[in-house]
Image: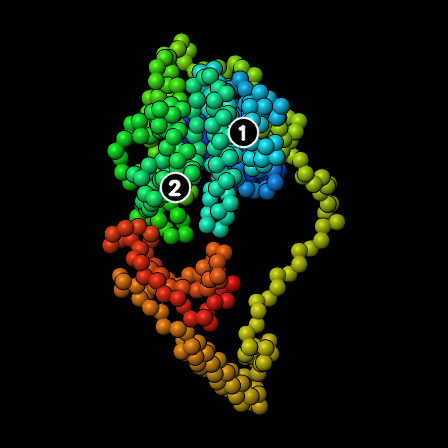
């Protein structure tokens, strides 16, 4: 999305064939917003009146540019939201006052500053586009931040009386069936999974997992894979990209379909979708509504014409020089000389034809050949010596040469090298075996 040709973003959105497209972890800064706006406005200058027109609503991370971020794109030829909230809440709103009963003002500002939520309000439902915080072993304190985020999201949903759809990367696998490496102990000890279990409980807030609504027993249905372990090769992943819905169990608007798209490549995640249907006259269409002020075309500054993006910053053209002013083109540099020509001069044929320099010529040729042979021998000796000092590479349980890797997590072993199975992560004979061996200490600081 960042700094691409102006037609690329529109073509990408067209290819998804959706009225609303939600992206997470966009990693865009506010400075990139102008490029997104320019890309969307590029189609406004086109001649195809029947083409889709998209409006973008983006949330950026304030404290760390290029981190986190979500974006919601709406096909304004079909429907337009009447209200848009950038963030979990709007400061000073009723929802903000309600959230202050659960979390401090400083904590709420911190949650809102990471650009993890865009809320779009339509006539028949409210859509939350979220990017849930991740928790790694390097930063266990982020679990408290993650739970505060979901507490605020829960409270925010309680303030809405309409139907609700929440889509995005939750960084939570709802059930054991949704992860290749689900630990049953974590389902009762990890607070984020307990929160998800309560959210989807029939006696809870009445949210449903749209995918499981249509595919209750489907296995090996994952949406995210570890790229470093090539886990997608063996489909060794988890389903953490979800579509959750509430309030669609009756009435004019229903959930028609939901599925994942694991065959769509280009990321360590794959797309997921949910389709809504309505029996209302005119459907969801609201194309004549004014575009909300939170659209990226208004956020990046005063609206410009598309031509200004192509002409701005171009150098002023000067008058073409007259025939008298034009300078002759410089002659092309001659081909680089080889060693023999440097020694013998420019015209080797004239030297060879004379009587006295002929012996000099043959002597130089012999010296040149001898130097080349010496260089080849030195190179071979160096390669042989380097091979002798290299440690013997072990083989894994598959009989394959083990892969050399480095510990990058913050621990007492950080920077230390180790050998492991070179296969992609997964189970069975095609998956990675559990071979592990520390490398020599002399390799600890290599490849830094």
Task: Residue 350 in the image: state x and y as whole percent.
Answer: 57, 81
The 10 Å Cα crowd at callout 2, few under 14, some 14 to 19, many 20 or more, is few
The residue depicted at 47 percent of the width and 27 percent of the height is 154
Q: Is residue 425 above or below residue 75?
A: below
- Asked whether, in this view, residue 292 is left or right of residue 52, the answer is right
| Sequence-first disc among 2 and 1 | 1
Task: Residue 432 in the image: state x and y as whole percent.
Answer: 31, 55
Q: Which residue is mark 1?
A: 102
Describe the element under mark 1 as helix, strand or loop.
loop
Q: Is residue 296 above or below residue 329?
A: above
Task: Please state which of residues 77 and 356 is positioned toward the viewer in this rendering.
Answer: 77
Q: Residue furthest right?
A: 324
Task: Residue 312 in the image: state x and y as whole percent.
Answer: 67, 35
Residue 12: quarter of image: top left
Describe the element under mark 2 as helix, strand or loop.
helix
Residue 388: quarter of image: bottom left
Q: Is residue 251 above or below residue 164?
A: above
Task: Please state which of residues 273 and 309 is positioned toward the viewer in this rendering.
Answer: 273
Labelled pair 2, 1 in contact (Cβ < 8 Å): no
**Label 2 vs label 1: CA separation?**
22 Å
- Asked whether, in this view, residue 379 is left or right of residue 212, the answer is right
Task: Residue 138 in the image: state x and y as whole percent.
Answer: 49, 51
The residue depicted at 38 percent of the width and 30 percent of the height is 198
The 10 Å Cα crowd at callout 1, few under 14, some 14 to 19, many 20 or more, is few
Task: Please state which of residues 283 and 398 is positioned toward the viewer in this rendering.
Answer: 398
The residue depicted at 42 percent of the width and 42 percent of the height is 267
The residue depicted at 38 percent of the width and 16 percent of the height is 253
Q: Which residue is mark 2?
A: 189
Instruction: Note whether residue 266 is visible.
Output: no
Q: What colour scheme has been applied to the protein in the rendered image? A: rainbow
- Asked whether, in this view, residue 368 is left or right of residue 167, the answer is right
Which circle marks residue 162 in the picture?
A: none
């Amino acid at each position: 999305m960042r700094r691409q040709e102006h037609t690329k973003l529109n073509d990408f959105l067209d290819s998804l064939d959706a009225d609303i497209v939600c992206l997470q972890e966009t990693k865009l800064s506010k400075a990139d917003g102008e490029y997104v706006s320019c890309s969307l406005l590029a189609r406004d200058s086109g001649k195809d009146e029947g083409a889709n027109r998209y409006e973008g609503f983006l949330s950026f991370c304030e404290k760390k540019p290029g981190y986190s971020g979500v974006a919601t794109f709406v096909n304004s030829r079909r429907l337009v939201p009447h209200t848009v909230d950038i963030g979990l809440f709007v400061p000073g709103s009723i929802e903000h006052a309600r959230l202050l009963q659960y979390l401090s003002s400083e904590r709420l500002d911190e949650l809102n500053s990471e650009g993890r939520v865009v809320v779009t309000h339509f006539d028949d439902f409210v859509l939350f586009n979220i990017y849930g915080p991740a928790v790694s072993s390097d930063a266990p304190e982020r679990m408290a931040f993650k739970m505060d985020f979901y507490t605020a999201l829960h409270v925010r949903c309680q303030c809405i009386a309409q139907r609700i759809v929440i889509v995005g990367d939750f960084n939570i696998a709802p059930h054991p069936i949704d992860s290749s490496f689900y630990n049953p102990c974590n389902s009762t000890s990890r607070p984020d999974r307990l929160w998800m279990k309560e959210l989807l409980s029939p006696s809870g807030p009445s949210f449903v997992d749209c995918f499981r609504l249509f595919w209750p027993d489907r296995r090996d249905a994952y949406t995210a894979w570890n790229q470093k372990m090539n886990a997608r090769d063996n489909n060794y992943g988890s389903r953490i990209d979800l579509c959750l819905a509430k309030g669609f169990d009756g009435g004019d608007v229903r959930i028609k379909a939901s599925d994942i798209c694991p065959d769509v490549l280009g990321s360590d995640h794959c797309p997921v979708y949910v389709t809504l249907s309505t029996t209302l006259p005119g459907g969801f269409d609201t194309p004549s509504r004014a575009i909300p002020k939170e659209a990226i075309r208004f956020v990046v500054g005063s609206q410009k014409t598309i031509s200004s993006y192509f002409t701005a910053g171009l150098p002023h053209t000067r008058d073409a020089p007259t025939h008298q002013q034009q300078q002759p083109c410089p002659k092309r540099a001659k081909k680089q000389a080889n060693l023999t020509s440097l020694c013998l001069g420019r015209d080797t044929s004239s030297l060879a034809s004379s009587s006295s320099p002929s012996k000099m010529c043959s002597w130089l040729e012999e010296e040149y050949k001898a130097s080349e042979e010496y260089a080849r021998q030195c190179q071979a000796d160096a390669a042989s010596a380097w091979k002798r000092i290299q440690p013997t590479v072990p083989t894994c349980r598959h009989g394959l040469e083990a892969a050399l890797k480095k510990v990058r997590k913050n621990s007492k072993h950080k920077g230390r090298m180790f050998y492991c199975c070179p296969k992609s992560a997964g189970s069975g004979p095609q998956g990675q075996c559990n071979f592990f061996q520390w490398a020599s200490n002399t390799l600890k600081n290599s490849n830094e």
